[in-house]
Amino acid sequence: MNKKEQLAEVHNKWLKNCKCELKILATQGVPGDGNPNSEIVFIGEAPGKNEDIEGRPFVGAAGKFLNEMLADINLRREDIYITNVVKYRPPNNRDPLPKEVESCAEWLKDELEIIKPKLIIFLGRHALEHFFPNEKISQVHGKILKKKTKIGNTFFALYHPAAALYDGSMRDILIEDFKKIPRVLEKIGN
Ligand code: URA
């Protein structure tokens, strides 16, 4: 099976079996999406209203902003893989609870083990803190984080595009941090 087929199998398995309590409230699960052969995986927080309706990650305002920043570094959505820590929409877009993160954790791990990306990029504190519980996004945004894991060794943290969208100074920082991605990839090499 190629990576695309393996991912389809993983998503089908977890769409059926995920025990996340948000499942009752959400319209549907939102699996990761994009290029399974990408060397970069972006990890966001949880689906919002538009994602819940469409069943795909980052299709609303935050996704549009993300697409613009990708275009600035000559990448398209088809070039990357993108997923969320939590796969079901929390009511009124509240922060996901630790037990909801925990319920979806194996699903995320399965996705990452198939893709084995060179670089994992956190979009916001929920993704960062899932892998680095002691780090603060305000301190490590725009920085490379290293840790030997089964799913990869190199991580890069960014502010969440939804949080930065309407906050001028955070927006500028995110745009600047985002432009470092090509250099980070170069540094990692092959
Ligand atoms: N915000 C996220 O963290 N994920 C999405 O899929 C959409 C918005």
Image: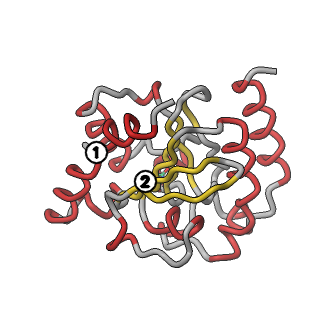
* Quarter of the image where one finds residue 166: bottom left
Q: Position of residue 175 (x, y in %)?
A: 22, 49
Q: What colour scheme does the image use?
A: secondary structure
Label 1 SS? loop
- Residue 91 position (above or below residue 10): below
Q: Amino acid at mark 2?
A: Phe
- Residue 178 position (above or below residue 93): above
Within 10 Å of disc 1 (Cα), the crowding (few <14, some 14-19, many 20+) is some
Residue for point 34% across, 61% down:
159
Distance (Cα) linking label 2 and label 1: 10 Å
Residue beneath disc 1:
180
Q: Position of residue 41 (x, y in %)?
A: 52, 41
| Left or right of 10, for residue 76 | left
Residue beneath disc 2:
156
Residue for point 49% across, 73% down:
94
Q: Position of residue 8 (x, y in %)?
A: 74, 31
Q: Position of residue 14 (x, y in %)?
A: 79, 48
Q: From the viewer's side, name the closer residue of 30 and 182.
A: 182
Residue for point 20% across, 51% down:
176
| Left or right of 108, for residue 160 | left
Residue for point 46% across, 33% down:
189
CB at disc 2 and ligand 1 closer than 8 Å: no
Within 10 Å of disc 2 (Cα), the crowding (few <14, some 14-19, many 20+) is many
Label 2 SS? strand
- Residue 71 position (above or below residue 164): above
Q: Quadrant of the N terminus?
A: top right
Q: Amino acid at mark 1?
A: Lys
Tags 2 and 1 touching, CB below 8 Å: yes
